Image: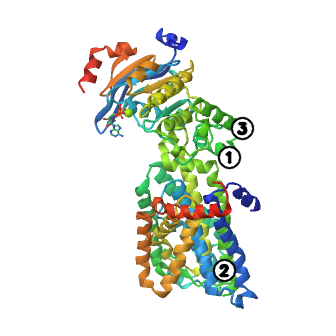
Amino acid sequence: MMTAFVHSISGEGPRDRAYLAVVMLLVLVVFAVPLLGLSPLASTPLGLDGYQVNLIGQVMAFALLALSLDLVWGYAGYLSLGHGLFFAIGGYLVGMHMIKLAYVGQSGVPTFLNYMGLSEFPFYWSGMEHFWVALLGALLLTALVSFVIGFLAFRSRVVGVYFAILSQAFVYVAMLIMSRNDTGFGGNNGITGFQSLFGVPLSAIESKVWLATASALVTLLTLILLRRLTRGPVGKLLVGVRDDEDRLRVLGYETLWLKIAVWCGSGLLAAIAGMLYVPQVQVASPQLLSPMLSIEIAVWVAIGGRGYLYGAIIGAILVNILKFWLTRFMPELWPFILSGAVLLVVVVLRNGLMDPGPTFRFLFESVRRQKVAGKGEGA
Amino acid sequence: MTSPQRQQTMHGSAQTALYIEDLTVEFDGFRAVDELTLLVDYGGIHGIIGPNGAGKTTVMDVITGVTKPRAGTVLLDRTHDVIGMHLSDRAAHGIGRKFQKPSVFEHLTVRENIALGVREYPDSLLREVLRGGGPAKRARVDEVLDTIALAAVADAEAGTLAHGQKQWLEIGMVLARDPRVLMLDEPVAGMSNTEREATAELLQRLRSPERAILLVEHDMQFVGQVSDRVSVMHEGKLLADGTMDQVTSDPEVVRVYLGR
Ligand SMILES: Nc1ncnc2c1ncn2[C@@H]1O[C@H](COP(=O)(O)OP(=O)(O)OP(=O)(O)O)[C@@H](O)[C@H]1O
Ligand SMILES: [Mg+2]
């Protein structure tokens, strides 16, 4: 991590500084959450309570989800309004793991299976008490599903708004299927009643702290990894796909496999985000598959700014903190604020907060000029 | 300014690079290219002129694989069936093309644009991504930068270039792979006189006995200046074929151009 860190300092510019600032922020979260969330500091005025730790953890999982979308949208130029599908695959499988774990050494099944007339776990639950089985299952299933969607869409050269609609259709169908009680995953209520993960009870503050820390750490590592990927040859090719795919194809590049690979990679990251998210909210329900959530992911990225990676993280953090705060104090206002923010981004800003465009440029420029003059640096 | 290559082409001893026979392209029943037969030789510059909508760009689209023809044959070296080839195979066989609308990657630097044109591992994208980018690639990029005279702006974002420079950059991207068939769709459109001169000189430098250059251009003076042979297209058909002087004195050609 250190070499990647130093590596990224070498190029100086406002973009590099913004990247570095976000990396620092994530590093700070990784260290601050266990330090301030556990005793002895937890009980001091500086300390974080369970609610705050949990909030940070959820926001970090969303930041990872936003990163995964920025890879396909910001770089390859394909807007997915169905990333909730991969998020949910990760979420449901880690949920199954935790349920199965709770029934180890006990007879009987959860009520939602009882309802189906089952007295034993069906075959696809076997081995789920092992975390690695759930992890592997989530990754393989996500890879398979994303491959099928990617292959169908990219081979038929579905682009632009049609791709967005297609991806939304998949997540919608999945929601309808998972909402049915007879699908075997608890219908509308989803699966819940988790007790512990890695031997730590979910009710304990320790599990909240470690889940939040893990979410921040995975987001940090993913940011560094994707930064390297997108600045290297793969990144150049993705920008090529986004800006002029025919030009790239006529240069002899088989863009189909490139797009499928990036799409699947993005899906896998979203699944991992789901695996981090569900133990923190302690339920995996069709809510994860709601078209609204998938659209919101795109809103976070749009507000932060597409194609910078750190922009997606900033967007996810800002929007979700605002959402947590508002839905606690004035929930009825949230839809209006969200729509307003979207309008602002679409109408006024060119590409989110990271690239506000000519209207706001002069503001930033004058601030920067003052700073530079103060330091006495050259341009 | 008669070059040796020019002599060779004029006497018909050159080899055929592209053999196009009875090529027909239809868009919803409209024939954009209508039973076109055309031979393009190695060693020279072959100009194609014709009014708007004559089908010039469509012919290039078929050769590069962007458009599928309804009927006809396109052979490379009289042996390889181009139409049956995958897009990436066409590029690997040395078919390169500059688009009519300048198509460079605006968010990448000039150097990065050209690097995309170089392939160290033509048969594997994975190996190209993992291992490509060595000194050989960098040397090739520098070579191309010199050829297209953009070395001074090598690290600028392509989007910041002037229109003429973008045209040269796109030629550079295509050139990076040392194409055997180089197709240029309106390379001097929107250029100043000085830029046109520079482009004419560039084209002369790109002549090679191992390369066929197909040039589509509306600027008749430019075509006349650089081409060895000129074909005139009209409504998807070949109207006339020969030297610039021959085709411009053809009564059919005169009628089409004046009757517009
Ligand atoms: N994808 C397409 N769909 C429908 N019609 C098309 C398509 N591409 C080209 N055409 C039509 O085919 C005809 C030939 O077009 P083409 O672009 O080949 O002409 P051109 O000779 O290159 O003209 P110009 O000098 O204006 O570039 C035109 O009438 C055009 O409208
Ligand atoms: Mg044209």
* Residue B33 against residue B16 in the figure, above or below: below
Q: CA distance from mark 2 to mark 1?
A: 41 Å
Percent coordinates x, y for residue A171 in the rendering? 46, 66
- Label 3 belongs to which residue? B135
- Image quarter where the C terminus of chain B lies is top left
Query: Disc 3 or 1, which lies upstream in sequence?
Result: 1
Amino acid at the residue labelled 2: Leu
* Residue A344 against residue B54 in the figure, above or below: below
The residue positioned 58% from the left and 37% from the top of the image is B117
Pointer 1 chain = B
Pointer 3 chain = B
- What is the number of the mark on residue B130? 1
Ligand 2 has an atom within 8 Å of the beta carbon of the residue at disc 3: no
Percent coordinates x, y for residue A51 in the rendering? 61, 86
Ligand 2, by image quadrant, is: top left
How busy is the neighbourhood of tag 2: few (under 14 within 10 Å), some, or many (20 plus)? Answer: many
* Closer-to-camera residue (B125/B50): B50
- What is the number of the mark on residue A257? none
How busy is the neighbourhood of tag 3: few (under 14 within 10 Å), some, or many (20 plus)? Answer: few
Percent coordinates x, y for residue B229 in the rendering? 43, 17
Task: Locate residue A273 relative to residue A331 in the image: left or right.
Answer: right
- Label 2 belongs to which residue? A101
Amino acid at the residue labelled 3: Pro
Percent coordinates x, y for residue A206 in the rendering? 70, 84
